[in-house]
């Protein structure tokens, strides 16, 4: 499995604080069956200014760290870029880091509690520049929670969705778990990521969520979310998922009783 969203690069944001914590997180991932991690430190103006050169340098250091301690987890560079102006231009200028520095997919974070400014325009601008935005943890964004059709609209515009593994397991409550399950069933989210910041509350683990994804859909879809499409992000291959499936109709009481 490949984790597409993880904050294990030490000393860059609110994730791993030091090399020891980076090692601990990588070991938890390896024990869970994760073979590779796309490291995605926050890039947020006025908060975490992790531009491309700094992230690439820290990835190289972490690769050496894991190799020296025999931790069998591969690390690729990425960044969790907060919604803001001129994103496509800043990628072209070499300031923002896309998945594995391929220039093709950008992990895009929306504000958690406030209305995202120019979200549709930003998606359009990125797509026009040949960059596909991957919406980070949409199930945890209030704007999408309040009106899920807003999220479906950005997916139909060509964005991809990345689901936090623990959301499927109820860590953030039953409402977010049900929303996550619905989006998995409808094909509205495409890749799994742990969004791990430590080894305890939200660890870099995917196995339980992958199994839940399989129960909601099938083994092929679970493999796509945890292995195939993450590998496409790393290799710089275009991802053209199927259109969202319609909502499942409620079968009513008799239908639930008799399997209709």
Image (cartoon, rainbow, N blue to C red):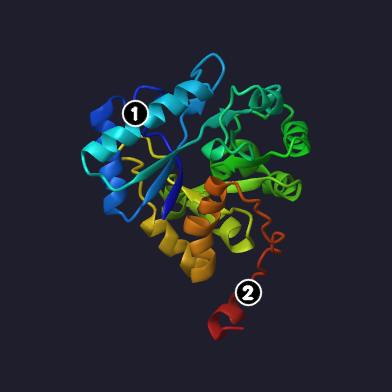
- Residue under the image location 70 percent in, 22 percent down: 85
Image quadrant assignment for residue 135: top right
Q: Nearer the viewer, residue 77 or 184?
A: 77
Above or below, 73 relative to 184:
above
Residue assigned mark 2: 252
Q: Quadrant of the C terminus?
A: bottom right
- Residue under the image location 52 percent in, 48 percent down: 163
Residue assigned mark 1: 61
Q: Residue 21 location in percent, x, y?
A: 26, 32
Q: Quadrant of the N terminus?
A: bottom left
Evaluate if marks 2 and 1 touch, with contact meaning CB atoms under 8 Å apart.
no
Identify the residue at the far top of this view.
Answer: 46
Please tell me whether mark 1 sits on a helix, a strand or a loop.
helix
Q: Which of the labelled discs sits on residue 176, or is there none? A: none
Above or below, 250 relative to 115:
below
Above or below, 67 relative to 122:
below
Task: Mark yes or no: residue 246 visible.
Answer: yes
Q: Residue 153 location in percent, x, y?
A: 74, 47
- Residue under the image location 73 percent in, 39 percent down: 130
Q: Residue 117 location in percent, x, y?
A: 71, 26
Q: Residue 208 location in percent, x, y?
A: 37, 58
- Mark 2 Cα-neighbour bin, 10 Å: few <14, some 14–19, many ≥20: few
């Amino acid at each position: 499995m490949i984790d597409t969203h993880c904050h294990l690069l030490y000393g860059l944001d609110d994730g791993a604080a030091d090399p020891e914590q980076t090692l601990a997180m990588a070991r938890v991932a390896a024990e869970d069956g994760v073979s590779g991690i796309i490291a995605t430190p926050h890039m947020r103006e006025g908060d975490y200014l992790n531009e491309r050169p700094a992230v690439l340098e820290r990835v190289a250091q972490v690769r050496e760290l894991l190799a020296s301690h025999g931790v069998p987890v591969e690390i690729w560079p990425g960044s969790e870029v907060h919604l803001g102006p001129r994103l496509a231009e800043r990628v072209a200028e070499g300031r923002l880091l896309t998945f594995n520095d391929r220039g093709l997919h950008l992990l895009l974070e929306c504000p958690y509690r406030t209305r995202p400014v120019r979200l549709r325009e930003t998606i359009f601008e990125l797509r026009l520049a040949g960059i596909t935005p991957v919406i980070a943890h949409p199930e945890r964004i209030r704007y999408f929670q309040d009106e899920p059709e807003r999220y479906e609209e950005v997916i139909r515009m060509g964005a991809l969705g990345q689901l936090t593994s623990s959301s499927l397991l109820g860590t953030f409550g039953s409402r977010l778990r049900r929303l996550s399950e619905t989006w998995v069933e409808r094909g509205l989210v495409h890749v799994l990521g742990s969004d791990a910041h430590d080894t305890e509350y939200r660890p870099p683990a995917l196995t339980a969520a992958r199994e839940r994804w399989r129960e909601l859909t099938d083994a092929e879809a679970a493999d796509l979310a945890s292995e195939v499409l993450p590998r496409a992000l790393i290799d710089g291959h275009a991802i053209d998922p199927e259109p969202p499936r319609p909502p499942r109709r409620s079968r009513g009481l008799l239908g639930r009783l008799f399997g209709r």
